[in-house]
Image (tube, helix red, strand yellow):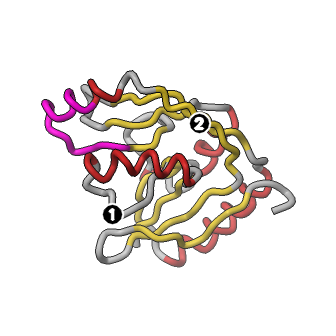
């Protein structure tokens, strides 16, 4: 089965992202706006049981932290993805690194750049037009992250929550 680990931002930030995603992201209907902590990976149910236990332990020792966005950016020329930039923090980087110590053979080929995708699979000209009109927007949000989610992929390609992990000892 395919799994992934994400942070879902607040409804206000999701609504903003979706206002662009419905036009520029073909995955709009498959998953809500999110910040990926662990890209899609394959695992059996038996492999996931100890991993879920470790995720609970990690969540307990990780205190809630701030998530801040600032602007629209792009991964071009690597690929034509447009995204809301999330400011990396030590807490976010540590959470990412600790999660990705598991299933290391399936780690991402790209370095961790915290973001919320709003457009992907765009042609070069479409990317240039859309990014050109969005890159000057200020997208200043600040919120507290108090949970992350383990997702699994359904047969139709959509993603749903398998388990939610609340951050902090009091969770």
Residue 121 in view, yes or no: yes
The residue at 39%/70% (across/down) is: 153
Find residue 44 and report its horizontal and vertical position in percent: 46, 74
Q: Residue placed at 35% from the left, 64% from the top?
A: 30
- Label 1, on which residue? 29
Name the residue nearer the viewer: 4 or 41: 4
Residue 25 counted in the magenta span: no
Circle 2: element type: strand
- Closer to the N terminus: mark 1 or mark 2? 1
For image coordinates 40% across by 61% down, the residue present is 31
Could you say whether the residue bearing mark 1 is in a helix, strand or loop?
loop
Quarter the N terminus occupies: bottom left
Q: Is residue 51 above or below residue 6?
A: below
Identify the magenta region: 118-130
Outermost residue toward the right in this view: 170
- Quadrant location, the C terminus: bottom right
- Residue 41: x %, y % from top left: 42, 60
- Numbered label attached to residue 141: 2
| Of residues 151 and 87, the one drawn nearer to the viewer in this rendering | 87
Which quadrant would residue 94 be assigned to in this image? top right
Residue 93 visible in the current orientation? no
Residue 165 point in image, percent of width and height = 67, 63
The residue drawn where x is 64% and y is 70% is 50
Q: Residues within 10 Å of mark 2 (few under 14, many from 20)?
A: some
Q: Is residue 41 above or below residue 17?
A: below
Q: CA distance from mark 1 to mark 2?
A: 24 Å
Q: Is residue 141 left or right of residue 166?
A: left
Left or right: where does residue 90 sit relative to residue 26? right
Q: Residues within 10 Å of mark 1 (few under 14, many from 20)?
A: few
Q: Examine the structure image and report whether residue 125 is included in the region drawn in magenta.
A: yes
């Amino acid at each position: 089965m395919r799994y992934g680990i994400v942070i879902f931002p607040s409804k206000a930030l999701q609504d903003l992202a979706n206002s662009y995603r419905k036009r520029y992201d073909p995955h709009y209907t498959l998953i809500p706006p999110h910040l990926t902590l662990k890209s899609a990976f394959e695992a059996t149910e038996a492999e996931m049981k100890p991993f879920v236990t470790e995720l609970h332990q990690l969540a307990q020792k990780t205190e809630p932290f701030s998530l801040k966005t600032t602007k629209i950016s792009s991964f071009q020329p690597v690929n034509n993805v447009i995204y809301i930039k999330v400011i990396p923090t030590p807490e976010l980087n540590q959470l990412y690194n600790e999660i990705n110590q598991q299933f290391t053979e399936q780690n991402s080929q790209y370095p961790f750049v915290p973001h919320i995708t709003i457009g992907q699979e765009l042609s070069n000209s479409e990317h240039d037009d859309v990014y050109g009109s969005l890159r000057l927007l200020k997208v200043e949000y600040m919120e507290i992250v108090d949970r992350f989610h383990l997702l699994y992929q359904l047969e139709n390609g959509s993603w749903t929550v398998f388990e939610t992990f609340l951050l902090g000892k009091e969770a």
